[in-house]
Amino acid sequence: MAAKEKTLADAFYETLKDVYYAERQSVKALKKSAKAAESADLRQAFETHAEESATQVERLQQVFEMIGKSARAKTCEAMQGLTAEMEEDLEDFAGSPAADAVLVGCAQAVEHYEIARYGTLKTWATQLGYKDAAKLLDQTLQEEKRTDELLTKIALTINVEGTAAAA
């Protein structure tokens, strides 16, 4: 018996499960990053985005419902790699003038991954006729982009401070 041919709907569902896992891991990583951050602005950004990410998890659950599938996570190798790298960097740079800059770099790697995934999911949802799901995914996509922009602004001050401390 031949295997069922995979469709865009299958790809959408598999990617949704991947992002669901990634977003749940992101909440944990953001909380850990907030505790490690020295900069008050960075700590606040992480705390705020952790709350936002918890809401994004709820949105993903709504998307699963909209497509008639159960909300299930599939291990996201990319997120596991990004969080493992963050753990290593936290250990290597803890207490150094560059610690917050490194945290921002790790957080932006996660944001860029999420931006790529949510952009893809939004496009596919639109193509599949999942209009309401596309709106929810776009809402999250815009939040991820705003967080990335905020981290860039914070990085400019942290990187200057870290550079000055090293001079």
Image (spheres, rainbow, N blue to C red):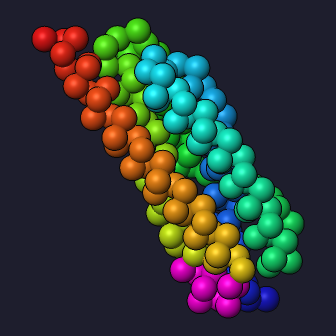
Q: Residue at x 56, y 26 (%)?
A: 34
Q: In which quarter of the image is residue 62?
A: bottom right
Q: Which residue is drawn at 60% across and 85% down?
A: 126
Is 53 displayed left or right of 38 in the figure? right
Q: Residue at x 52, y 26 (%)?
A: 43
* Image: magenta residue range: 123-131
| Above-or-below relation of 122 to 118 | below
Q: Which residue occupies the foreground of this view, 119 or 69?
A: 119
Is 95 displayed left or right of 69 in the figure? left
For this orientation, the residue located farthest to the left is 167
Assign the C terminus to one quadrant of the image: top left
Predominant SS along the magenta part: helix
Q: Which residue is drawn at 54% across and 63% down?
A: 141
Instruction: Tell me, yes or no, if residue 68 can be seen here.
Output: yes
Q: Which residue occupies the foreground of this view, 6 or 140?
A: 140
* Residue 60, x across and y down, in percent: 73, 62
* Residue 77, x across and y down, in percent: 57, 49
* Residue 146, x across and y down, in percent: 47, 53
